[in-house]
Image: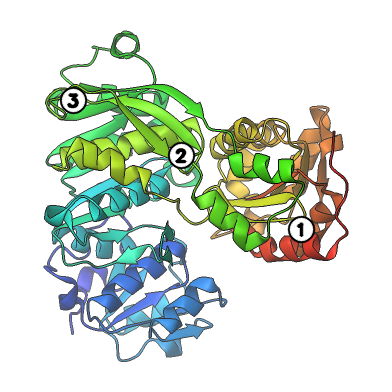
Amino acid sequence: MSKMTETTQHVRPLPADDALADISTIHDLGRVYFCGIGGSGMSVLAQMLHQDGVEVTGSDRVDSAYTQHLREDGIPVIIGQSAENIHDVDTVVWSSAIPADAPEMTAALAQGLRLAHRSDILAVLLKSHRSIAVAGTHGKTTTSSMIATILSTAGEQFADPSFAIGGSLKTSHGTIPGGYVGKGEWMVAEADESDGSFEKYRPAIAVITNAEGDHLDHYGDVPTYRKAFVEFAAHATQGVVLCADDEGAREVFAASSDAVATRTVLYSTQTSSEIARVLPGGLRGARFVQISQAHEIAAQAEEDSDAAGVSETAAQGVAAEANEVAESFDIQLPHDLDATDSVRTVDLHIPGIHNARNASAAITACVLAGVDASAAVQGVGAFLGAARRFDFQGEVNGVRLYNDYAHHPTEVSVLLEAMRRRFPHRTLRVLFQPHTYSRTKIYTRELVDALKKADDIVLSHLFAAREESSDFPGISSQTLIDMANSEGVGERFSLIDDMREAGRTLAERSSHGDVIVTVGGGDINRADPVILEALESSAPKGREA
């Protein structure tokens, strides 16, 4: 059993500390206990260690779909966290959501056990593979999932890649978990920037989808937040893929060294000359990927069902949605990555200009890794989406239901813009669960401005995550209602604290042809089956003109 040093025995290491610098493989960890195993990122790592033969156990405060799935995989999970749970283990893994004085943390320290932040585990996994790590305020899960899909279909050289993604992947064989240990040499990982721990990763290829300010409860201000991305990019040993459409990502590029700039591939819907004009110092030797002619395809399945005067069942609707092309765009890679200089058309099953950017990042990263450009384009075309990202839940009585993990105002905004483009003549209804007190406080106006793009907005209770209400007096879902009223759009907003009741209410308001989307980074997806059931049991209303 590995003991902690005397100097750290009574202090939990910081997330950015490289607590496993002496560890070569995950098998050196011994028996591993995950404190907070039901988190999206923690559960993925627990699955990966378990798949690779490590003895894994863990606990969480409440049962969830994640903990249930872990049990089904043969991982013991304790509901309820106490000091008595820490026995017969060698390494205790924690996340930033776990307070330093949590009973299990205190017990681990008292027993002198090895403490590892979840990012330490991922760093060890990345160290044992050739890797692509995806960071960004938005789009990490989707882009990582696209890269995993491309690598999985790119031929023998890239066969059976490992991946660590904070969400499940939808495939033609069903939904699969986001954690997988393959036999191939490549690994793709979602690099969470929320606590700065992604700076310890050393990937071959780093992807930065954007760097809009977020997690200011940790970083304090936006410049400090973006500085962490500069450090992350500097650690990529082979290349960096960066979105030049995003102001924050452009600032990261401008602050990077010339050595990093020459290893960078920028991608943008603007031209290289337009981007060069807004970058201090210009492109500085960076290569450029041009995105053009992005246009969304009409929801043909919906139009056909309307014309026939019938409604699909939930299961039929999901199958139809998976087969639709939702977004089409052209991409041209630099000559050294695609010697044909071809303008290639990419067809996606998920809508939105933001997903055209995500797909361009995925294609570029895979081509940098050695995948043939044609195979990369074909591979991303096979991507059916990530769970909880524009995730079609079903259609009942002519009403479509989607779920999305969006919780930052920019994510909410691009989601609703994509839905407006996809369903321009439909009534759009949103059930939104604010995520964390700090984000609700900082982005009150921005959240309301994003949400008001819908016709009908119902707010559920705020999802606190790791935060305490006592630290944010006066902040709740009502804060958004008050802002909506002050902006003169309050008639479209309502607050129903219980998410199930909110879902039923929204279903009762809906008419044939409407689109409902449940939105939030917490557990708002638990309202989805309630909404479908309410739509099934309610009498269908007439079509709207």
In primary-sequence order, the first of circles 2 and 1 is 2
Judge whether 110 appears above or below 11 on screen.
Answer: below
In primary-sequence order, the first of circles 1 and 3 is 3
Estimate the spatial distance between the alpha carbons at disc 2 and disc 1, rounded to whole Å. Answer: 36 Å
Name which residue type carries label 1.
Answer: Gly
Label drawn at residue 220? 2
Estimate the spatial distance between the alpha carbons at disc 2 and disc 3, rounded to whole Å. Answer: 27 Å
Residue at image position (30%, 31%) is 242
Judge whether 198 appears above or below 180 on screen.
Answer: above
In x, y percent, where is residue 212? Answer: 45, 33
Label drawn at residue 284? none
Q: Which residue is mark 1?
A: 503
- Whether residue 21 is visible to the viewer of this picture, yes or no, is yes
Q: Which residue is mark 3?
A: 261
In primary-sequence order, the first of circles 2 and 3 is 2
Graded by Cα atoms within 10 Å as few (under 14), some (14 to 19) or many (20 or more), the crowding at tag 2 reads few
- Is label 1 in contact with label 3 (beta carbons under 8 Å)? no
In x, y percent, where is residue 427? Answer: 76, 38
Name which residue type carries label 2.
Answer: Gly
Residue at image position (25%, 35%) is 364
Estimate the spatial distance between the alpha carbons at disc 1 and disc 3, rounded to whole Å. Answer: 48 Å
Secondary element at image label 2: loop
Left of 112 or right of it: where is 269? right
The C terminus: image quadrant: top right
Name which residue type carries label 3.
Answer: Ala
In x, y percent, where is residue 438? Answer: 59, 46
Q: Quadrant of residue 417?
A: top right
Graded by Cα atoms within 10 Å as few (under 14), some (14 to 19) or many (20 or more), the crowding at tag 1 reads many
